[in-house]
Image: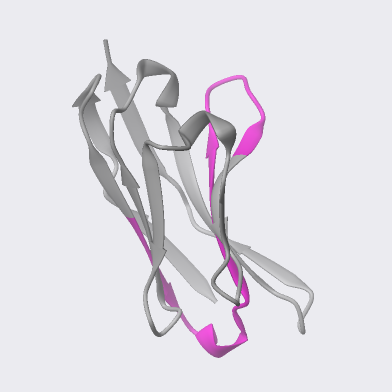
Amino acid sequence: VQLVESGGGLVQAGGSLRLSCTASGSIFSIDNMRWYRQAPGKQRDLVAGITSGGTINYADFVKGRFTLSRGNAKNALYLQMNSLKPEDTAVYYCNADSTNRGTSYWGQGTQVTVSS
């Protein structure tokens, strides 16, 4: 499975961005998909995720501002980010896992920068 993120960029505080993650390869094996983010010098944090059954969870720091959605064919994951704050500045990574295969896949990341 290959994951490619897009949609990052520079935006002013209060603005919006929509991140996309496109999956290719053995997408039939994908179960759960998630967005993580990592700011310089900090650990990688879970932002939002969706299970194979469609359950969506958000980190407290994005609740009410970010919306996660998934393509019908499991080959796309989206993150609509509204009311962005400077502290949202990070590299955002798409992640997918396969329970049967016991594997986890990562994209290369997309930079989001929010200016104050």
Give the quadrant of the C terminus. top left
**The N terminus is located in which quarter?**
bottom right
In depth, the one of 75 and 107 nearer the eye is 75
What residue sits 42% from the left and 26% below the top? 88
User: How far across and how far down the image is residue 11, in percent?
Assistant: 21, 27
Whether 60 is drawn above or below 54: the answer is above
What is the total number of numbered labels drawn onto the structure image?
0
Residue 24 in the image, given as x and y percentages of width and height: 44, 79
Direction front: furthest residue: 64
Identify whether 23 is placed above or below 69: below
Residue 29 among those drawn in magenta: yes
Range shown magenta: 20-45
Is 63 left or right of 106, judged from the image as shown? left
Picture coordinates of residue 43, whole percent (x, y): 67, 29
Residue 52 picture location, percent across and down: 60, 76
Is residue 93 found inside the magenta-colored segment of the image? Answer: no
Identify the image quadrant of residue 28: bottom right
Q: Is residue 70 above or below residue 24?
A: above
Residue 104 figure quarter:
bottom right
Query: Which residue occupies the foreground of this view, 101 or 52?
Result: 52
The colouring scheme, among rainbow, by chain, secondary structure or one colour, is one colour
**Image vertical order of residue 56 relative to residue 114, above or below:** below
Residue at the top extreme of this rendering: 116
Say which residue appears at 29% left-offset and 42% top-offset: 8
Q: Could you tell me which residue is drawn at 23 percent across and 29 percent down?
A: 10
For residue 103, side relative to residue 26 (left or right)? right
